[in-house]
Image (cartoon, rainbow, N blue to C red):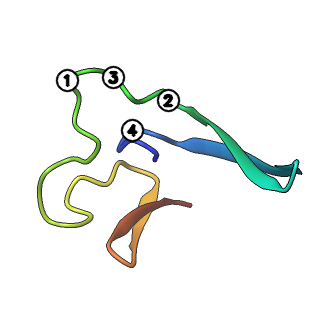
Amino acid sequence: MAWATTRRLGCAVVICSGRYNVVCRYSVRGNIVGEEIYKRGRPCSQCPAGTTCDNNLCKWN
């Protein structure tokens, strides 16, 4: 799960002993106690400069 402020995301998948293991790293970090995952408001109403709205999500150009 990426937070609203996340700008970069990278994941890897490996099968070990017949089980899938997924590890993801992202930046700006999230999972901060007391911080909400999403920003409140209409979709794309708070997109930062340099982004566009794509399927109700802010997308970096």
**Residue sitting farthest toward the front:** 17
What whole-number distance in Å separates the C-alpha atoms at marks 1 and 3?
A: 6 Å
Q: Pointer 2: what residue?
A: 28
Could you tell me which secondary element the residue under label 4 belongs to?
Answer: loop
Q: Pointer 4: what residue?
A: 5
The residue at the point 84 percent across, 50 percent down is 14
The residue at the point 42 percent across, 66 percent down is 52
Say if mark 1 contacts mark 3, CB within 8 Å: yes
Say if mark 2 contacts mark 1, CB within 8 Å: no
Give, as a three-letter code, the residue at label 3.
Ile
Residue 2 horizontal side relative to residue 44, left or right: right
Mark 3 is surrounded, within 10 Å at the Cα level, by few (under 14), some (14 to 19) or many (20 or more) other residues, namely few
Q: Pointer 1: what residue?
A: 34
Q: Pointer 3: what residue?
A: 32
Residue 53 horizontal side relative to residue 23, left or right: left
Give, as a three-letter code, the residue at label 2.
Val
Q: Is residue 25 above or below residue 61?
A: above
